[in-house]
């Protein structure tokens, strides 16, 4: 997407100006916030005007790409801001020490800083503002992580056999997913249309259970394809050494643990750039956690509503339901044990997603297609 380069170059040159103190004060915050807002707004405008130019899959890919770029450039801006703040603090500390050496604490901090600087020099690590290059920014945008670092962990070589296995998995599982979707999911969802239109709750429940099995197999296959095969392929090609993309979420004792383990790139981003900064600004843990859920719910809604051109709050509401579900599963786990908490996790995965799919499919067909054409 060539147009995305404009946002990348803007972020790069903006950081260059900030590193040279050409922009000061709160202007930095306003410019970055406006830029990030524009990144999310562009797909809304473009896909709204030129609706027929893109397929549903194409619209989804565009929204995913711009959402990932939004998260990455947020991280890029915030980390560089932290680096400037640390650099400014070091200058102030150095000025204080030039007038007086009375405070032992200042002396100790200075010694630690000098030792750290020596270690950085010995390891040949990149320091701010030497990291502000287009090569560095494009590497970060391509790397399988949402959190920017001045020095990413790097592997020594490409393991050819490992890479070949992951690439074959990407090709094979992609075709399996397409076959399952066409032969299993689409017929099941089509058959649920009349039941939802007639509000036949018994038949809706039957269709929900019938869709639950193929949908869950599809979701598990997609998870393996995305978080194991694809991200490892990308990491291997880029010599990216941090492969901590997920942990054993299938053993999660409650819903909160599941959300922390199943998508580690997003979890680490939310923890680093939303949760921890809010905690440092004296917000409560509950408020910080709620803010993370609000942002996550809004982005999930964005990724569904914009491609479908259906501006509802179904996905947002579904994500916000996770907040009380986290509380309930935690209480169940503490009272009855981790197995019962894990049962709630799997039940929400197996039944929640098919329900959302059928509801959105029904509304999408009503909006865009004549149901009589489907033979329903």
Image (cartoon, helix red, strand yellow):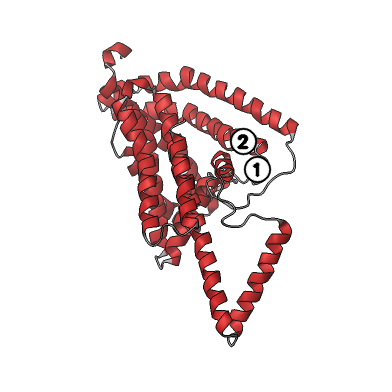
Residue 267 position, x and y percent, is 51, 49
Badge 1 element: loop
Instruction: Estimate the spatial distance between the alpha carbons at disc 2 and disc 1, rounded to whole Å.
Output: 8 Å
345 relative position to 41: left or right: right
Q: Which of the numbered marks, if any, corresponds to residue 45?
A: none
Query: Does the CB distance between marks 2 and 1 fall below 8 Å?
Result: yes
Q: Is residue 305 visible?
A: no
Q: Tell me the quadrant of the picture where the C terminus can be found.
A: top left
Vertical comparison of 52 with 325: above or below: above
Tell me the crowding category of disc 1: few under 14, some 14 to 19, or many 20 or more residues within 10 angstroms, Cα based.
many
Badge 2 element: helix
Vertical comparison of 283 with 292: above or below: below
Residue 200 position, x and y percent, is 28, 27
State which quadrant residue 113 falls in. Answer: bottom right
Residue under pointer 1: 240
Closer-to-camera residue (187/199): 187
Residue under pointer 2: 234
Q: Is residue 185 visible?
A: yes
State which quadrant residue 351 falls in. Answer: top left
Residue lying at 39% horizontally and 65% vertically, measured from the top left: 283
Residue lying at 74% horizontally and 31% vertically, measured from the top left: 160
């Amino acid at each position: 997407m060539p147009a995305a380069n404009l946002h990348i170059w803007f972020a790069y040159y903006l950081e260059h100006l900030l590193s040279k103190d050409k922009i000061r004060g709160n202007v930095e915050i306003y410019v970055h916030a406006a830029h990030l807002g524009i990144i999310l707004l562009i797909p809304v405008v473009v896909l709204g005007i030129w609706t027929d130019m893109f397929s549903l899959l194409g619209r989804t890919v565009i929204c995913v790409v711009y959402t990932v770029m939004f998260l990455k450039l947020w991280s890029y801006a915030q980390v560089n801001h932290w680096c400037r703040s640390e650099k400014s603090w070091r200058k102030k500390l150095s000025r204080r020490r030039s007038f007086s050496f009375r405070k032992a604490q200042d002396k100790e901090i200075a010694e630690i800083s000098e030792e750290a600087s020596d270690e950085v020099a010995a390891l040949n690590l990149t320091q701010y503002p030497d990291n502000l290059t287009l090569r560095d920014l494009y590497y970060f945008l391509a790397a399988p992580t949402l959190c920017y670092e001045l020095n990413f962990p790097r592997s020594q070589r490409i393991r050819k056999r490992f890479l070949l296995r992951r690439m074959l998995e990407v090709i094979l599982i992609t075709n399996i997913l397409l076959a399952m979707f066409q032969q299993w999911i689409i017929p099941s969802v089509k058959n649920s249309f009349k039941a939802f239109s007639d509000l036949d709750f018994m038949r809706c429940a039957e269709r929900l259970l019938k869709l639950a099995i193929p949908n869950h197999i599809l979701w598990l296959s997609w998870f393996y394809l995305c978080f194991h095969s694809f991200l490892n392929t990308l990491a291997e090609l880029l010599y990216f050494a941090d492969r901590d993309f997920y942990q054993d979420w299938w053993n999660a004792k409650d819903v909160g643990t599941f959300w922390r383990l199943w998508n580690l790139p997003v979890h680490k981003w939310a923890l680093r750039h939303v949760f921890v900064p809010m905690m440092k600004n004296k917000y409560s843990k509950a408020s910080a956690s709620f803010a993370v859920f609000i942002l996550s719910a809004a982005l999930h809604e964005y990724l569904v509503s914009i491609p479908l051109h259906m501006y509802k709050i179904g996905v947002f509401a579904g994500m916000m339901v996770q907040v009380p579900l986290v509380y309930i599963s935690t209480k169940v786990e503490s009272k009855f044990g981790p197995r019962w908490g894990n049962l709630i996790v799997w039940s929400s995965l197996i039944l929640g997603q098919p329900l959302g799919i059928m509801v959105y499919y029904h509304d999408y067909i009503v909006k865009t297609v004549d149901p009589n054409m489907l033979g329903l």
